[in-house]
Structure formats: structure tokens, C-alpha cells
Image (cartoon, rainbow, N blue to C red):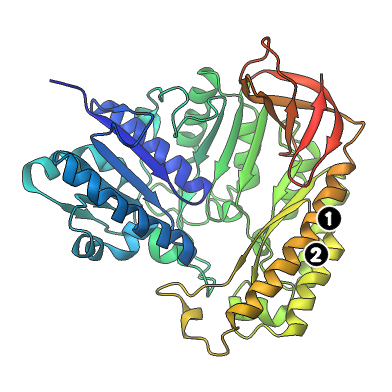
Amino acid sequence: MDQKVFYIKTFGCQMNVRDSEIMAQSLAVHGYIEGMDIEGADLIILNTCSIRAKAEQKVMSMLGYLRKNKKNKPHLKICVAGCVAQQEGRKIISKMGHVDLIIGTQNIYDIGELLEKVCKEGPQVATGLDDKYDIPNLIPHLSPLTPGSSTNTVPFRKFVTIMQGCNNYCTYCVVPHTRGRERSRNSSDIIDEVEVLVEGGVKEITLLGQNVNSYGKTNSVNPLTEGYSFARLLRQVSETKGLRRLRFTTSNPKDLTDELIHCFEDVKNLCPQFHLPVQAGSDSVLQRMNRKYTVQQYLELVDKLRRCCPEIALTTDIIVGFPGESDQDFEGTMNLLENVQFHGSFSFKYSDRPGTRAITFTEKVDESVKSERLARFQARQDEISLKRNSEYIGQTKTVMVEDSSEKGVKSRTDTNHIVHLPISASLKAGDFLDVTIIHAGQHSLRGKM
């Protein structure tokens, strides 16, 4: 019997990247092999994101494209996984009759068994959300990934999920509705997974969660040690022998503790880089977003971080055009940008998302105004990013090689800056070396060895 080939297309965030890895490794256990292109696949998985309307539209467009593939190859199986699958469920099959499997965010570990049911019984939908859901121990799913595949692009850098779901219910966000209530993994399972990965050659680990700062506060199935915090987990993981770099994402400012901030001061392999989403620079907008902190409190956190770790590179998320955002509110966001001088940011126009409170808010901001504000914010951020990056010129930085080809060498600093280097046959992915920064662009640096 011929081995079946699968291909995964991942949309959205780092959490989805890790979920795609889990599905790929689970499928390998069930006898599937990962292909390098969509045309040769017997199984196509779209791992989806619904945090913005544009991402969801891309998924539906691709499903329309795949209708022809299914017609030309009747045995082809098409699976929609992730947040759009969780959100839309059976509606997807009613719109796209060529889809075989809808698999929600808590069901990805069962993808092998669900595909067997598809072959026997026809299309399946698995989108249940359980508030008492216990995240499985991932050690059985740590089979090798296909080198160079879409789910294994940087084999020496891996994501480790420490929690899923969210209890914050920001008024614009679908995550609590698509990933469920907040659930922390057992700390011993996390440590075991990190040790297995590092023993296998992984040198950089990123701990993942919708709000890692609240790790350990909610876990009813496997209660954690009383008082066990994310900072304590971070310190434990950092002690893993052979781990060169440690990162984490994402954080909510309302839960950022002094204990965690001080980790940047004394955990030696914790990278001096922090993504701290602020979303807006207006207290009234933050209140309508249900973010539970003020601009002044955010600035105080930034000050503490920079006092503990002066070289820290700070990035953020910004939403422009939230319902009711006035010109004065937006000027507050621009003032915040000038005050903090972020190294980079991810900025987007607000879009209504199903099931959120903000969809019911009146005073929607006109699309043309949102576009104008976003363009202005991004133009200024690009100027600041170039200025920030120029500060590295002449400095010697340690980088990890991510890719080496005839086009050159792509590497990354501990502050998460991409550094392009000249072609070198002696360098390979996972190598560490010291380089001198000789040029700065808005989004990357150039160095010499």
C-alpha cells in the first residue's frame, strides 16, 4: 500500500505554527509522510486563524481553489483545522461540500483517528470545547519532522505550548470563543518536552500561550503546586542543559509581575526581547477593549523592563479604528509610540469578529479613516525601527544561523533581529557565531563575520 502524503498550510500566529507541528507529528505516527507541495498531497490541511477578517477570507478563498484539486483527485482529503474551523464548524461543509474534516482547536491531537472515521463514515466535524480540557502530554508526538518542510522551517528553534485558551475576554478578540477557557499544562510535562527537544538538537525554545503571564492560575485537572508562577516555570526551563536561547509569547500587561520582569535581569539564556501588546494609547479605548490597564501603567512597566534590562528590544500590537476611537484617542496612540520608541510593532485595522462584544458597539470608524490612521502609524513606526536598528551598527552580536544557501546566510540575534550575512559554505542552520553589524534597514540588519 502506498504511503499517504499530507501538506499543511498554516495561517496566523505562532500558536498555529506549533499546532501544525503537532498535527504533522501525530500524522507521522499514523503512517503519513509530509510533502513539500500542495499538488502532490493526498491530504491537505488548512490550519486557520480567525483573529482578523482578512485571515478568514484567505482561508475561504483557498478552499474555493481546492475544489478543482478534489475534482481532479477524488481520493484527496481536505481538512480545515484551527480557529475558523472552531468558529464555523459544520457551516464550512455546507458552503464547501468538498471538505472532509473540520477539526477544532482542542481536537488536533485526534487527527489520525478522525481521518480513519472519514474514510469509513464520510465527512466529520470535531469542534467541542471543554472547560475541563487537559492538554495532552506531547512527548508521544515528538517524532521527527520532515527536514525543510513547511512545519519544520527552522529545526533548531521550536515552540512549546504551555497553556491554551484565555479568560480575559477583550471585547475585540475571538480567542476565548475559539480556543476556550484558559488551561495550563502540567509543569513536569513542559520540562520533559523541552528536555527531549534539546537532547534532539534544538537550541532555542519559545514558550507559547495566549497569556503566558497567567500560567498556573487555572488548571482543574492536574493542579499545579500552589503559588507556581510563570516566572518560576521560566527559570526551571532555563536550567535545561544545552538550551542556548529561551523566549516566550504572548503577554498581557495587566498580569506582568515584577517577578517576571526580573527574569530579564538574571536568567542568562532568556533573550532580551519582549513582545508586550498595548493595542491603543488611549485610556478610554483601552477601557472599551476591556484591557484592564491604563497607558500610565503600561509606561511604568516599560520603565521597569528597561531598568532591569537596558538592551531589551520591545515590540507591541496596535489596533487602529476601534469603535469610538476619536482623533484625540488616535493621537494618544501616536504619543505612546513616540514615548516608548518600539523596535517594531504589528498594527492592524479593527475588524468585527463573530461572538465578540465589540461587534455590537456603535460609533464604528469609517474604513477610510482607519486606513489613513494605520498608514500614518506604520510610516512613523518604520522610521523609528530604522533608527532603533541603526543603533546596532558597529556592535558585535551573537547570532544563530537559520538558513544558509547560495543566496546568503540568514541569522538572528537574541533581540530577534534578522541579520543577513555573506554566502558561506562553512555555516549551517543552528550554528552560533559573532558578527559585526555593518548596515541597518527597517526590518533587518546586515553583518560581517
Residue at image location 61% in from the left, 20% down from the top = 405
Residue 211 vs residue 73, the one in the foreground:
73
Image side of residue 239 versus residue 185, left or right: right
Q: Which mark is residue 204?
A: none
Q: Alpha-carbon neighbours of circle 1 within 10 Å: few (<14), some, or many (≥20)?
A: some
Count the numbered circles shown.
2
Residue wearing tag 2: 337
Q: Which mark is residue 384?
A: 1
Q: Is residue 214 among the parts visible in the rendering?
A: yes
Give whichever of discs 2 and 1 has the lower sequence position: 2
Which residue, as the protein is rendered here, is positioned at the far left? Answer: 120
Image side of residue 429 versus residue 78, left or right: right
Residue at image location 40% in from the left, 43% down from the top = 9
Amino acid marked by disc 1: Ile
In x, y percent, where is residue 438? Answer: 87, 30
Q: Quadrant of residue 441?
A: top right
Q: Give yes or no for contact between labels 2 and 1 (Cβ–Cβ under 8 Å).
A: yes
Residue at image location 42% in from the left, 36% down from the top = 21
Residue at image location 35% in from the left, 30% down from the top = 25
Image side of residue 391 versus residue 368, left or right: right
Image side of residue 317 versus residue 442, left or right: left
Q: Quadrant of residue 142?
A: top left
Decide: is 39 above or below 330.
above
Label 2: state its secondary structure: helix
Amino acid marked by disc 2: Leu
In x, y percent, where is residue 173? Answer: 50, 68
Q: Is residue 180 among the parts visible in the rendering?
A: no
Q: Alpha-carbon neighbours of circle 2 within 10 Å: few (<14), some, or many (≥20)?
A: many
